[in-house]
Amino acid sequence: MIDIDPVDTRPVETRLLEQFVAVASEGSVTRAAERLWAAQSTVSAGIASLERALGVRLFDRTGRRLVLTTAGEDLLPHARSVLDSLDRMRDLATVDDADLRGRVRLGIFTSMDVVDLTGVLRRFRQRHPLVAVELMTSPTGTTGLVQDLVAGRLDLAYAALPTVPSGLVVEPLREMPFRVFTAADHPLARRRSVSLAELAAEPFVDTAHGFGNRTILDTALDRLGIRRRVVAEMNDMPAVVRFASAGLGVGVVPDAGVRHDGAVLELEDAVEPLRIGLAMRTDPEPNRATRTLARDVVAARVP
């Protein structure tokens, strides 16, 4: 049964809809406040104000998570549609690219240069000072970034999965082959190449589950019927190379050109390279600021 409160007949402010959508996406007032760069008390008060204005309760608390009520689920797509329409109106009202304004949330990898992103962002800020670009990462690598993009928590994201959900378009940026990294004094270090079967008994260093390279390699190992022992999981590929070079285990990861003190061998097995692209949603259509930044990032890729 839905609790009905007295309806506040004053107009609903756009910021209240933004807070509603953010809390619905994050399931938490705290995370929604971080996403909106607002105080937690401001977001809580905003949700309460919107509930009074509409005369319905929008969220129930389940443990530490906020979940939409039936009324909240019904109203959420309309709130998103209003915000999307306002974005489109701002786009249409912008005559010159120099007048672009708004916010673009870009999901990136922290320790790997896909393109000269710092250069891209510096030039973008000079040309479009009214656009705020926010950089975000995910502890589950490309899987988390793609999930955040689909959920609307990001506008653009690096993607390196073999397949991506429908509703996303991906522009290729960089391709990297898998290679084997070991310590300089490892028994295999003098070899030019090695197979995954020969590495089966070795301890492995790898990235955590969810990273695109981990997904690709795990699929190849499963296909070959090889089970391995991962002794250390890292949150970025350069760390895998460093720890493998130090002798903690062998690393089989895409070669990103990271400097190291160990040995690198070719991989004899046919493993698909890591293909990194820039992903963007197609529905709703991204605003001009998002499309412009995406164009700049893609233009910066190395031929």
Image (cartoon, rainbow, N blue to C red):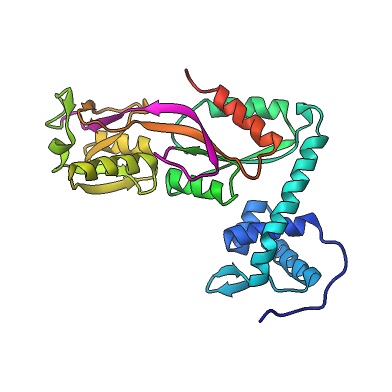
| Magenta run includes residue 64 | no
Residue 138 visible here:
no
Q: Looking at the image, which residue sits at the far right?
A: 10
Q: Position of residue 175 (x, y in %)?
A: 40, 27
Residue 208 visible here:
yes
The answer to which quarter of the image holds residue 111 is top left
Examine the rendered structure and indicate whether residue 84 appears above or below residue 70: above
Residue at 58% over, 45% down? 154
Examine the rendered structure and indicate whether residue 210 appears above or below residue 9: above
| Magenta run includes residue 178 | yes
- Figure label count: 0
Q: Nearer the viewer, residue 175 or 251?
A: 175
Please give left or right for residue 132 compared with residue 206 in the image. Answer: right
Q: Position of residue 116 (x, y in %)?
A: 52, 25
Q: Nearer the viewer, residue 114 or 80?
A: 80
The part of the chain drawn in magenta is 160-185
Q: Looking at the image, which residue sits at the far top?
A: 303
Q: Position of residue 41 (x, y in %)?
A: 70, 65
Q: Quadrant of the N terminus?
A: bottom right
Q: Position of residue 210 (x, y in %)?
A: 39, 48
Residue at 19% over, 41% down? 224
